[in-house]
Image: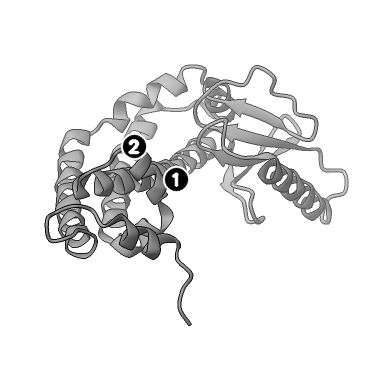
Amino acid sequence: MKQLNIKDVTQYVEANIGIFHEKRIKSLDNLKLDKVLKRKNPYLFKAKHTTTSEQIIRGIVDAHISSNEETIFGDWLEGLAIFINEKVYNGRKSGIPNIDLEFDKDGVRYIITIKSGPNWGNSSQIAKMISDFKTAKKTLRTSNSLLNITAINGCCYGIDNNPDKGDYFKYCGQEFWSFISSNENLYIDIIEPLGNKAREQNEEFQKSYSQMINKFTKEFSNIYCNDNGEINWEKLVRFNSGIAKK
């Protein structure tokens, strides 16, 4: 085990955080109005007395951003965790499907699936993760039948006061970052560098966001508003939920 140098973490974050912001902007640039309209419940907008095109557009775009950013940043944090673990324990990105990180500590091979937060999946998704852990153990023991393997579900934020799940352990927040780095304060130390140039990066994102809102509002109004400016709910619902004509 090696001592973690926080300067290495800071340099990694500062060098790579731009990737997260670039992907945020790219996700907006790739949006298409017809696709996002298909994903959103038009009945909900009507029930909430939504009366303007912009309200609808902000609702669907903001929902897309919220969901997409969690995924993008989760992937980014996974890369950070692997980088840190490599510095301390010579860990590595696993070559086994659906396993994110592997490293050895005190005679144990740890296989880790990294998630953003603790409430990431339903029962079937958790069952799939357990199945992936079992498959990974079989794969690793093909070359070493005596290998002592422990499966970990690591979550980058949150708390779980009952980490022993039987088939695996679930470490969240401070416990996860401490586990992969042997640094109890790492979960706090990584906050500051994450804000590096965040204001400038967010200004660029806000520019793209505003342009997308204006573009989609105009497009939506042209297609789904009557001449008097009122939303044509029948036309919108037909597009969203009507049976496609063959």
Residue found at the very far left of the displayed protein: 228
Residue 217 screen position, x and y as percent:
18, 54
Q: Please, which colouring scheme is shown?
A: one colour
**Residue 71, numbered circle:** 1
Residue at disc 1, secondary structure: helix
Disc with the residue nearer the chain's start (1 vs 2): 2
Residue 21 drawn above or below residue 224:
above
As measured in the structure, the alpha-carbon distance from the residue carrying label 1 to the one carrying label 2 is 28 Å
Quadrant location, the N terminus:
top right
* Residue closest to the eye, 207 or 3: 207
Residue 237 screen position, x and y as percent:
38, 58
Residue 218 horizontal side relative to residue 130, left or right:
left
Kindly tell me whether residue 28 is visible in this rendering.
yes
Residue 44 horizontal side relative to residue 209, left or right:
right
Q: Are marks 1 and 2 in contact (CB under 8 Å)?
A: no
Q: In which quarter of the view is residue 220 placed?
A: bottom left
Residue found at the very far bottom of the displayed protein: 246
Q: Looking at the image, how many numbered discs can be counted on the residues?
A: 2
Residue at disc 2, secondary structure: loop
Residue 15 screen position, x and y as percent:
29, 43
Residue 62 screen position, x and y as percent:
31, 43
* Residue closest to the eye, 200 or 209: 209
The three-letter amino acid code for the residue at tag 1 is Thr
Residue holding disc 2:
48
Query: What's the residue at 54%, 29% (across, down)?
Result: 2
The three-letter amino acid code for the residue at tag 2 is Lys
Residue 143 drawn above or below residue 90:
below
